[in-house]
Amino acid sequence: MKLIIAIVQDQDAPSLIEELMDKDFRVTKLASTGGFLKAGNTTLLSGVEDDKVDEVLKIIEDNCKTRDITTSLLTVTMPGDTYMPYPLEVRVGGATVFIVEVEKYMRV
Ligand code: 2BA
């Protein structure tokens, strides 16, 4: 068994969870925050049998879009200690996925 950890954009989470549930995969949704943008994203945990991993990855790929986001994360220091927000283009997604071997899975 593998644990699939997928970090996705909030907008993509509802359709992704719906399709996973429709296809009888179990999934847990966690509210998370990206370290770089300091903005909310969604982390999904799904324990799946080895032969189902590719199917789950395909569902993630189909539901998660790449988006270009303009953020004002950077600031430029101006004379007189004034800070000006400086727009920064960042490409986010579709999804960041980790696949981890599960040593033991129990529901007691
Ligand atoms: P954030 O850390 O908020 O990053 C959002 C996007 O900002 C990233 O999109 C990437 O395009 C950009 N970015 C991140 N760090 C950067 C840096 N040092 N310099 C320039 N640009 C940077 P994604 O790569 O699609 O990542 C989306 C979210 O997935 C991340 O949100 C983070 O929450 C998570 N993530 C990505 N890689 C990870 C990793 N190796 N370990 C843990 N979480 C990760």
Image: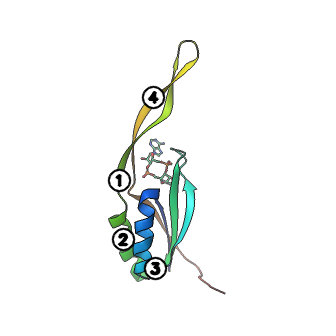
Label 2 or label 1, whichever comes before in sequence order: 2
Instruction: Tell me how far mark 2 sits from mark 4, CA to CA.
Output: 36 Å
Label 2 or label 4, whichever comes before in sequence order: 2
Q: Which residue is mark 2?
A: 59
Label 1 or label 3, whichever comes before in sequence order: 3
Q: Which residue is mark 1?
A: 66
Is 64 rendered above or below residue 47?
A: above
Instruction: Tell me how far mark 1 sits from mark 3, CA to CA.
Output: 24 Å
Indicate the secondary structure of the residue bearing disc 3.
Answer: loop
The reply to whether dot 3 and dot 2 touch (C-beta < 8 Å) is yes
Query: Which residue does the image show at 50% across and 80% down from the upper left?
Result: 1
Label 3 or label 2, whichever comes before in sequence order: 3
Residues packed near mark 4 inside 10 Å, few (<14), some (14 to 19) or many (20 plus) = few
Is 104 rendered above or below residue 15?
A: below
User: Which amino acid, by three-letter code, is at mark 2?
Assistant: Ile
Q: Which residue is mark 4?
A: 86
